[in-house]
Image (cartoon, grey):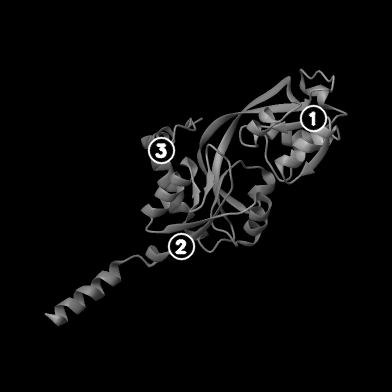
Amino acid sequence: MKILASLSLLLSLAITPAWASVVWQGHCRDRAPLIWVTPAGCSGPGIEVINIAIERLGHRVEWNPVPWARTLAFARSGEVDLIPLHSMDAEREAFLDPILIGYAARTLHFFKNADNPLQISQADQLSNLSIGALNSSFYSETFNLSMASLNMVFVTQTEQLVQMLQAGYIDLVVTSEQHGLEIYEQSAGLVAVAYQEVTLNGRYFSVPLHSVHHQYVPALRAEIEKMRASGEITEIFTRFGVAAPVSG
């Protein structure tokens, strides 16, 4: 009996995938209502979608809150394995392998100091104005391409932009639902201008090209595609009370 038990154990070990104990290191940041930081790590529909897909590969994720600029720096060298939930541009494609969750409409809003008489109703009126934005952030394909011809002022924290706008150091701030819109709406002395930009923006999570787990991307992408096709991703977002990304 002992021999049979030993053989059974050896057989079970032999058929257990070598990746069953794979642990992915994930970074997150506050991007409510898609992702938020908790005492236990990270939560939200964007995190749950990834967790479920990873677990179906027989793996698990250790999530840690990390500032966005530091995450991008770690991603270039492969010191992080998973980055939720973000947009893609040509610069990021050089070191990230993106997996599409779906598309969402994104509206760019522009805020000014309420005492500033500026009236902005179209894109060409942004020229010659100082516009504050978050460093290394993707707003939209159109706006990010236009940054080279605009007078941009980049900082790392939304609160810095609020203070600069309140003090009159800059003319405008660009923001969206993914870039702290509610903070500007709730800040004294700030108002939105009439001009807005609406785009259909892809929502991705990525595995850095230099991650030690990059080999599993085809299996992970296939699992996410199944979850999209079956409507499971929509169900997860709906359970959290958040508008689900669309197929596009």
Question: Any mark on residue 172, and which?
Answer: 1
The tag earlier along the polypeptide, 2 or 3, is: 2
Give the residue at mark 3: 236
Q: Estimate the spatial distance between the alpha carbons at disc 2 and disc 3, rounded to whole Å.
A: 23 Å
Give the residue at mark 2: 23
| In the image, residue 10 above or below residue 88 | below
Q: Is residue 63 left or right of residue 148?
A: left
Mark 3: which amino acid? Answer: Ile
| In the image, residue 66 above or below residue 7 | above
From where the camera sits, is residue 189 visible? yes
Q: Is residue 191 left or right of residue 40?
A: right
In this rendering, which labeled residue sits more in front, label 3 or label 1? Answer: 1
The tag earlier along the polypeptide, 3 or 1, is: 1
The local secondary structure at tag 2 comes to strand
Q: Is residue 164 left or right of residue 202?
A: right
The local secondary structure at tag 1 comes to strand
Instruction: State the residue at coordinates (49%, 42%).
Output: 46
Instruction: State the residue at coordinates (65%, 49%).
Output: 68
Residue 144 sits in quarter: top right
Label 1 neighbour load within 10 Å: few <14, some 14-19, many 20+: many
From where the camera sits, is residue 131 visible? no
Q: Nearer the viewer, residue 120 or 200?
A: 120
Q: Estimate the spatial distance between the alpha carbons at disc 1 and disc 2, rounded to whole Å.
A: 43 Å
Q: Can you give x and y, in whole percent of width and height, for residue 150 in the image?
A: 83, 33
| In the image, residue 20 above or below residue 29 | below
Mark 1: which amino acid? Answer: Leu
Q: Residue furthest left?
A: 1
Mark 2: which amino acid? Answer: Val
